[in-house]
Amino acid sequence: MSLYSEKVMDHFRNPRNVGVIENPDGVGEVGNAKCGDIMKMYIKVENGILVDVKFETFGCGSAIASSSMATEMIKGKPLSEALALTNKAVTEALGGLPAYKLHCSVLAEQAVQAAILDYYKKNNIPYDPADFKNALEEHGHGDGDGE
Amino acid sequence: MKVYADNAATTKVRPEALDAYVKTSQTLFGNPSSLHSEGQRAKELLEDCRARVAAVLGADPREIYFTSGGSEADNQAILSAAKSGALKGKKKIVSTAIEHHAVLHTLEKLKKEGFEVVLLPVDGSGIVKVADAEAAIDENCCLVSVMTANNEIGTIQPVEEIGALCRAKKVPFHTDAVQAVGHLPVDVNKFGCDYLALSGHKFEGPRGVGALYCRRGAPLFNLVEGGAQERGKRAGTEDLPAIAAMTVALELAVKNLPETAKTVQTLRDFVIDGLSSIPHCALNGDRERRLAGNVSFCFEGVEGEALLLYLDDLGVCASSGSACTSGSLDPSHVLLAIGRVHDVAHGSLRLTFNENNTMEEMKYLVEAVKTVVSKVRSFSPVWRDLQTGKRQYIL
Ligand SMILES: Cc1ncc(COP(=O)(O)O)c(C=O)c1O
């Protein structure tokens, strides 16, 4: 099927880091109220490093591939770097997404931020709300949406 | 194994139709409007096809207009009745919530032009209530449009009853029979319809060709202006090879209809029974009053596009009414109309069969769907929440 790039299909067929982390340090669940997709991200943090990341996704091929790619891009990275992950970077790493599927990559960015925010809150770590703009927003349509 | 289970979307052209296509384009290539003998031979075949299509529908050949397909036929019928109605000050149209977009979008356009459009609801199994139609039809109506059978969930509508109602109330009746022709007995007099749309590619004919039945005396306006083809109602040189191929396909479909329907229904029932064992799923549409080749399910905790892509990897071609496959973010209006909530409509799967499918394929298909549903559920946060009791099962 040529709806998606080969990279998307690879991550869809063989999602990386799929599943749950028992006793995670942070969990983020975000959804697109309109299309109904839901993404859940689990993280394990040691010394400010994301030592483990796992995800579960209820959504289409691009939503699954976006979550998979996002976990791959942040695993083993410092939190600050993970926080800087953008939907644009995820989309580019996937070799592009159809315009009407861009909101799926936004969901991945939001899920990462939501998980880190959860970690900060649980551990009473002070944070700059500006870093979590997207995660704190109502989980509606991301601005990466092509419609 | 390869399983093509998307015959409601389109079918593979049957060899006899392809032969007719090739033969016509090579040996009867004249323009039916030309005076010379090549043209007149083509004209003869064109009129022969018209008579044969008419015979299948119980119509008069003068009531058959060849079109570019089902969408055009639906558009022309509805816009004609509306235009004629408006001239008499009647600007109300009654239709249903589950029509194909060829009908619904045409009605939306008319709504913007000031028509009142009433879309009848359907019950949980996807069937329109005749009493609702009766209550909605009044003297301001210029058209009632109810599809013969639904393309997504396969339900067969009470068109004969609604047709009789329209006769009694003297309101023109249109039926989109695109999914029905070649699969169910269709007779314009039994249906009591004034307009009926059909499309070649749903019964193993070519795509891009269809027909509009328009009862004598019912208003018909052009969508395409130009030459005098199709009794002046549809300009453009006729696609005779396609018309000939469609006619052959239609005749063959109808000739073997009872046997084919029985065989296909056996496949359908096997798949419905097989998939019903998947936990937390539901069949969409009526169990009995449905097209012989239609299976439609919703699986809870599953998203349809992912389902389709994984099935495709296993060689199965299917379709879904999921929001993610629509390109519009909204799940299918048909699934919403039968009361499926967004989350559940998300996990829909449509499998549509015809005579080319085999029982061996069905056995493979059922296992493939079971495997893929389990796979998608294995990493679905919605499924996890359902299983842990954080969310309540709907199905
Ligand atoms: C119920 C129904 N009406 C109309 C159409 C449109 O037919 P066509 O593709 O020939 O324009 C289709 C098929 O796509 C259909 O299923």
Image (spheres, helix red, strand yellow):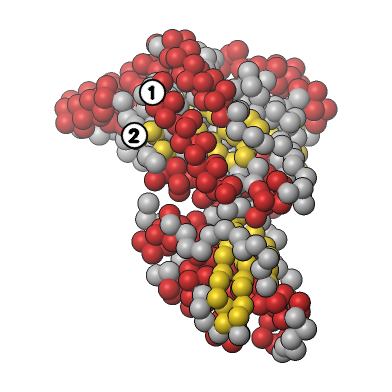
Q: Nearer the viewer, residue B370 or B57?
A: B370
Image quadrant where residue B208 sits: top left
B28 horizontally vs B58: left or right? left
Question: Which residue carries the number 2 mark?
Answer: B1
B206 shown above or below B191: below
Q: Nearer the viewer, residue A26 or B255?
A: A26
B136 horizontally vs B354: left or right? right
Residue at (80% x, 31% y) in the render: B136
| Cβ atoms under marks 2 and 1 closer than 8 Å | yes
Callout 2 amino acid: Met
Q: Position of residue B170 (x, y in %)?
A: 72, 22
B86 shown above or below A86: above
Q: Nearer the viewer, residue B315 or A3?
A: B315
Q: Chain of mark 1?
A: B
Work out which quarter of the rendered image holds the C terminus of chain A and state it.
Answer: bottom right
Task: Mark 2 vs mark 1: tell me if same chain.
Answer: yes
Residue at (75% x, 35% y) in the render: B121
Image quadrant where residue B194 sits: top right
Question: Which residue carries the number 1 mark?
Answer: B360
Q: Nearer the viewer, residue B309 or B239?
A: B309
